[in-house]
Amino acid sequence: MPETVPSPSPVPSASGIAGLLARRGLHYGWVVVAVTFLTMLVTAGAVGAPGVLLGPLEKEFGWQTADISAGLALRLVLFGVMGPFAAAFMNHFGLRRVTVVALSLIAAGVAGSFVMTKIWHLVLLWGVVVGLGTGLTAMVLGATVASRWFAQRRGLVMGLLTASTATGQLVFLPLLADLTERLGWRSALGLILAVLLVAAVAVLLFLRDRPADVGLPAYGATEVTPAPPAVSFGTMLLSPLLALRDASRTGMFWLLFGTFFVCGASTNGLVQTHFVSLCGDFGIVPVAAAGMLALIGLFDFVGTIGSGWLSDRYDSRLLLVWYYGLRGLSLLYLPFSDFSLTALSVFAVFYGLDWVATVPPTVKLTAERFGDRANLVFGWVFAGHQAGAAFAAWGAGFSRTAYQTYLPAFFFAGVLCVLAAAVLIAARRRAVAVSA
């Protein structure tokens, strides 16, 4: 009697783990969420590192704040522009391959920084290389995981993954600031390289592209959804542009794009990049300023997960009104505070709760309006976010160089947030009137 040879599973290790977890009542999608959380946490640490390194680079090389900010602004532009193409790459090559390439690019940019001596080295390494690497992951990775692996709890999952950026700040920035102060900024870069390696190993071992790869339906679904048919490389490259063409004909796209521009201009482009230097202008040492950023990250972790929970239950437009309004008021308050511990703590609480709480309802509105092309369209919406971030990163650096203060940039960002809230109120009233 011939020996029966079992047919091999396409990913036997993952299928085995998925089966074991399923018998214990745990969907493998949560493992994918954990790996994605780690990846986004580590890349957030890399993105936030220049906020700590700004002062040391100025001192060592004699570069002006405006020049450094221009290089960092380029990073933020590429971080955003890559979004829709990152979604296309993930659709074509798979999550795991794209994520490993992204982590490798970030590591290459950080490693090259050890030998940089000129401003164009900074622009190339942190502006181009790190910008491309972080752009391949960014929020689009989280949105893709949430939409592929979860038919239910998408808002909560997106809240968790968005909160990873806050956790990255909470974990890494005080460490980076302390290492920079005690051992120099190159030691801080060494820490970033180490955690990038850990994340890459986790991605290779555990990240899978789709639930079908481990023989499971998406969380909350009842049937396994096969991967869509493969398309040519040319079609893949065109898909983001076609998605932009169609989406740009709708008012919803421009509402999301414009408000997310304001989101970027009032978060990572401004506070994440310049807050430590702003505090230094008022005599606050970098470690203490980074600790305040960590406090912002702690409250943002709570606020963003709460936002994910709320976005599964309430009108996303109404949530965004509250988030932009409260963020705007906190930014308007900061220039008139005395920068005491109490004043900065008040700012950290109210600003932190709203920092990236805007992401889950924005992703939900994008998914509801654009369906199967949601991750491509969200890539373009996120490009708007990073255009705003680049504008704020450069603008705040210009303000510091031209006027010897960052405060006008913070006040202007607060005004933009209040205006965004007003636009969302009008949009919600129009939507209610149409549905009635």
Image (cartoon, helix red, strand yellow):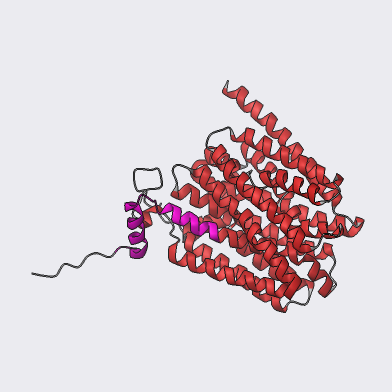
Main SS category, magenta section: helix
Q: Residue furthest left?
A: 1
Image position of 158 with respect to 9: above or below: above
Quarter holding the C terminus?
A: top right
Residue at 72% x, 58% y is 291
Q: Which residues are magenta?
A: 9-38
x then y, percent, for residue 295: 69, 53
Image position of 294 with respect to 150: above or below: below
Quarter holding the N terminus?
A: bottom left
Residue 28 falls inside the magenta stretch: yes
Is residue 384 left or right of 63 when viewed as pictured? left
Most foreground residue, 187 or 152: 187
Most foreground residue, 243 or 152: 152
Image position of 113 with respect to 367: above or below: below
x then y, percent, for residue 208: 43, 59
x then y, percent, for residue 78: 67, 59
Residue at 44% x, 57% y is 209
Residue 250 in view (yes/no) = no
Is residue 337 left or right of 131 when viewed as pictured? right
Most foreground residue, 360 or 277: 277
Residue at 33% x, 57% y is 20
Image position of 288 with respect to 352: above or below: below
Q: Quadrant of residue 57?
A: bottom right
Q: Residue furthest bottom?
A: 115
Q: Residue furthest front?
A: 342
Residue at 73% x, 33% y is 422
Residue 376 in view (yes/no) = yes
